[in-house]
Amino acid sequence: VILTVTLNTALDVTYDVAVLTPYASHRVGAVSRRAGGKGINVARVLAALGETTVVTGLAGGPTGAAIRQDLAAAGLRDALVEVSAESRSTVTVVDPEGATGFNEPGGGVQPQEWEAFCASFTGLARTADVVVLSGSLPPGVPTDAYARLVGIAAAHGARTLVDSEGDPLLAALSAHPDLVKPNAAELAATVATDDPLTGALTLRSVGAGAVVVTLGADGLLGVTAGGAWRARPPERVAGNATGAGDACAAALAAGLRARTPWPVRLQNAVALSAAAVRSPLAGDFDHPTYRRLSAAVTLEDLHAIDLDR
Amino acid sequence: VILTVTLNTALDVTYDVAVLTPYASHRVGAVSRRAGGKGINVARVLAALGETTVVTGLAGGPTGAAIRQDLAAAGLRDALVEVSAESRSTVTVVDPEGATGFNEPGGGVQPQEWEAFCASFTGLARTADVVVLSGSLPPGVPTDAYARLVGIAAAHGARTLVDSEGDPLLAALSAHPDLVKPNAAELAATVATDDPLTGALTLRSVGAGAVVVTLGADGLLGVTAGGAWRARPPERVAGNATGAGDACAAALAAGLRARTPWPVRLQNAVALSAAAVRSPLAGDFDHPTYRRLSAAVTLEDLHAIDLDR
């Protein structure tokens, strides 16, 4: 079982309009409402890979109900914990020229609600092989939330992947997660370096078991206890990069569960990320692209680097 | 008891942003979610006037639940009928330069849901003194919906006000509503004339007991069986015209309930509309403006016109 945690769930609403005209009134054509937040996207990909997946996190109000309704429609197992504040929505207005996004801040979580979540999470962690902790923290959740959850998961024998940035990611390292997966921008926002390798080594030195830095169309960098690799897609893939990072996290989580050797795990992650770029919706991926690229990702062994420098 | 009917309820969402930039991502500041649709706005104003008010109409899905939650928060009596399709939302993005609106189409109503509504409405009509039927019809509701509801209401002794336009308004006239209240543009979209007086006389000739045509900042025109009047505000009022028509409908409904003499009723309607313009949200009005203008609206008796021409 892979348990994905989305503390800052969202209802992702997409509006199709003929043309976006500021200060005009628009008749919306197609409307899509989809449960979102990074961990939910990860769970969608995992479910499509055939992994047994459970979704937890926080949801509240009618928007929380809409999120849960969509999880049910997608066949995802819902272990979300109810909070009093209304969950946030994101609205994306799409016209032929592009997408315009509006992101709500989200409501505050009460201290007793956070404690109730931790209690529920402890129960779920008992049955989990891998726990994936994804995304930002909503207001009211303490900065060391991921550290606490990683500690609980590890105490119950689950391996952990943290996909976040900044202070919540740094705080999580003290609990020694098995894997952290920032992209290059998130890494730079977390440690004071623009060099992915230096940044990855820094995160390992302060507690991460392994670090995967995603590099967009250039693939990724993996730094583990047993070696370091650069994996690159065999070709440039055009499409929608939203959700590529979540697909990467899903591949890495599946690899953690199956204890796939790191080189294969990294190649898989690059192929699945590229396949997600070929799909318009976060949480989906293009299966033919995934199959085609899986065997074609190039791997460079960075054996010369000193992992403990 | 005044019963307001909103078949096409909406959740009116307002986002404050620093500046609207097409094709960018926006962090939303303040978020407001409010139950909307013309009849709900009318009910808010009526409740603020001290009228006993019941809200009915159709609502569905998590958005319907959000609408009902807001009605409860506003202390409005909720007799909405549940439907399977999700209620529509409207999103208004406000920056210092103005407002940009996105209006969802709304889901379809099933025939048996419409029948269930009519059954529920029949029960509610028994206790109503006045029934206010406001706004557009959602997909799936027949064009003669207001005609049927006016007939049911009249059979139970309730007086009726229809605030709609186009085919649903025309169809309603066959059931002889006591009052219809188009604005000048709605009137022109319903009967083929740009002259409000000609249009009002036409609507009376095909079945309306009385016709009030709102004329924006110029006040209104009232044509009744007992006479015709022009009522004008004593001054130009600056502000947000959204909701002014609903405030006018509320004043007219309260006048129908209390059988206030027409001249006073029309003056009240102009004062309350102007007070609504002074309030940023539809369904609210500025009480000092209402009190100040109530005695100051000018009335012109159009005694020279032939009401049966």
Image (cartoon, coloured by chain):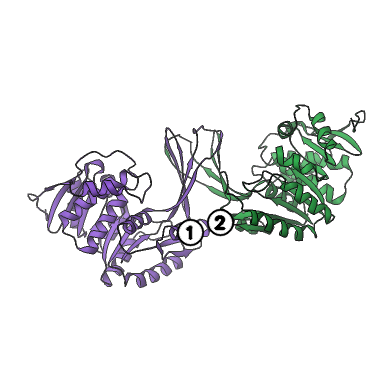
Chain colours: A green, B purple
Q: Residue at x 34, y 59 (%)?
A: B47
Chain that bears disc 1: B
Image-based side of B273 in relation to A60, left or right: left
Give residue A36's position: percent from left, percent from top.
Answer: 63, 48
Give residue A250's position: percent from left, percent from top.
Answer: 76, 46
**How many residues crowd around disc 1 within 10 Å: few (fewer than 14), some, or many (20 or more)?**
some
Which quadrant of the structure image shows residue B257?
Answer: bottom left
> Hey, what amino acid is under mark 1?
Gln
The C terminus of chain A lies in quadrant: top right
Figure check: A229 above or below A5:
above
Figure check: A209 above or below B128:
above
In the orientation shown, which residue stands out farthest toward the front?
A111
Label 2's element?
A: helix
Same chain assignment for discs 2 and 1:
no
**Residue A144 or A41: which is nearer the viewer?**
A144
Image-based side of A209 in relation to B51, left or right: right
Give residue B291's position: percent from left, percent from top.
Answer: 24, 49
Image-based side of A20 in relation to B2, left or right: right
- Which residue matches tag 2? A61
Which quadrant of the structure image shows residue A244?
Answer: top right
Dot 2 and dot 1 residues touching (CB under 8 Å):
yes
Image-based side of A164 in relation to A35, left or right: right
Q: Residue at x 72, y 40 (%)?
A: A245
Figure check: A37 above or below B94:
below
In the orientation shown, which residue stands out farthest toward the left?
B304
Label 1's element?
A: helix
**How many residues crowd around disc 2 within 10 Å: few (fewer than 14), some, or many (20 or more)?**
some
- Which residue matches tag 1? B69
**Residue B289 or A294: which is nearer the viewer?**
B289
**Residue B147 or B177: which is nearer the viewer?**
B177
> Hey, what amino acid is under mark 2?
Gly
